[in-house]
Image: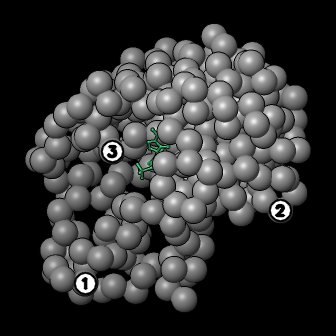
Amino acid sequence: MKVLITGASGMLGADLRTALGEEHELVLADVVGDVTQMDITDTAQVMSVVGACKPDVVVHSAAYTDVDGCERDPDKAYKVNAFGTWNVAAACQKYDAAMVYVSTDFVFDGEKTEPYIEYDLTNPLSHYGASKLAGERHVRELCPRHYITRTAWLYGEHGKNFPYSIMNAAKTRKELKVVADQIGTPTLTVDLAATIKGLIETPMYGAYHVTNGGFCSWYDFAVEILRLAGVTDVEVLPIKGEEWPSPTRRPAYSVLRNYSLELQGRDNLRPWQDALAWFISRVKE
Ligand SMILES: NC(=O)c1ccc[n+]([C@@H]2O[C@H](COP(=O)([O-])OP(=O)(O)OC[C@H]3O[C@@H](n4cnc5c(N)ncnc54)[C@H](OP(=O)(O)O)[C@@H]3O)[C@@H](O)[C@H]2O)c1
């Protein structure tokens, strides 16, 4: 198949290139990097790029992902995450492409005490979550052949992320304060990319939660990162979410259950601890 990847220069984009490039013909698009330049907020440009390459599937990973930035500048959040997605969905509809949209656990309010399934009601607390949810709606309305993949706490080799921040902070500090009252599931971009590859090869369009197995707090995640990295002389101190300086309200509990994948008998994502161990051994090399 011919697959167009938006946000191809981003953290997930890099691993999508590797996973999908093995078997599919790729067209790579972003606003940065040595790829086809396509600003998703430019309707004419999106129509022109999609119309020129006529992909079978568009994997739409581009987004304004700075959560605090979205809170400070909601218009930019909606412009990129909602209107940008609207453009991509309209182009998919016009040129008859299926569409993958990468969404987020931030569409939920975190009031539940057991994992969220795809049929649970959404109620975002932040402009990032609301703008990503608006993107989901455009995809559902315009593009019947869609796969909406909600994921969480992403990290991977090719981007800024929590494991890198913790490992870097541990080089210069003996104490790290980390939020212990927000629970979710760290998810490796390589594992999400492999799942997306599997999905686009099926006709099972719909909504999917895609995270690694299990759950933890940011504090637990940090402790495990340092343990696996062999750092023994740094103490991790648990703090409350409200003590962390951020304008963004985050869900206290945003564990996603990969229920659609489970129902199809194809939830084969490994536990987050195993994925993290693989990641740390790879970046240590
Ligand atoms: N990171 C997470 O924890 C997480 C969790 C759940 C869901 N997600 C979703 O997963 C997807 C991938 O996330 P990621 O962490 O890989 O993000 P990322 O590294 O920020 O990659 C996103 C890419 O999109 C580009 N982009 C921004 N505005 C654009 C525009 N107007 N037109 C075209 N491209 C634009 C970015 O360029 P710039 O770098 O120049 O902005 C970047 O290269 C996103 O849809 C995100 O919402 C992420």
Q: Is residue 196 left or right of residue 129?
A: right
Q: Residue at x 15, y 74 (%)?
A: 175
Residue furthest out toward the top? 141
- Pick whichever of labels 2 and 1 is earlier in the sequence: 2
Q: Is residue 9 visible?
A: yes
Residue 101's spot in the image, x, y percent?
Answer: 61, 33
Image location (x, y in percent) of residue 231: 33, 85
Q: Residue at x 33, y 76 (%)?
A: 167
Q: Nearer the viewer, mark 1 or mark 3?
A: 3
**Residue 140: x, y in percent?**
64, 15
Q: Amino acid at mark 3?
A: Asp
Marked residue nearer the N-terminal end (2 or 3): 2
| Front tag of 2 and 1 | 2
**What is the three-letter code of the residue carrying label 1?**
Lys
Q: Compared to 143, does 179 lie above or below?
A: below
- The mark that comes first in sequence, 1 or 3, is 3
Q: Quadrant of the C terminus?
A: bottom right
The reply to whether callout 2 and callout 1 are in contact (CB within 8 Å) is: no
**Image mark for residue 22:** 2
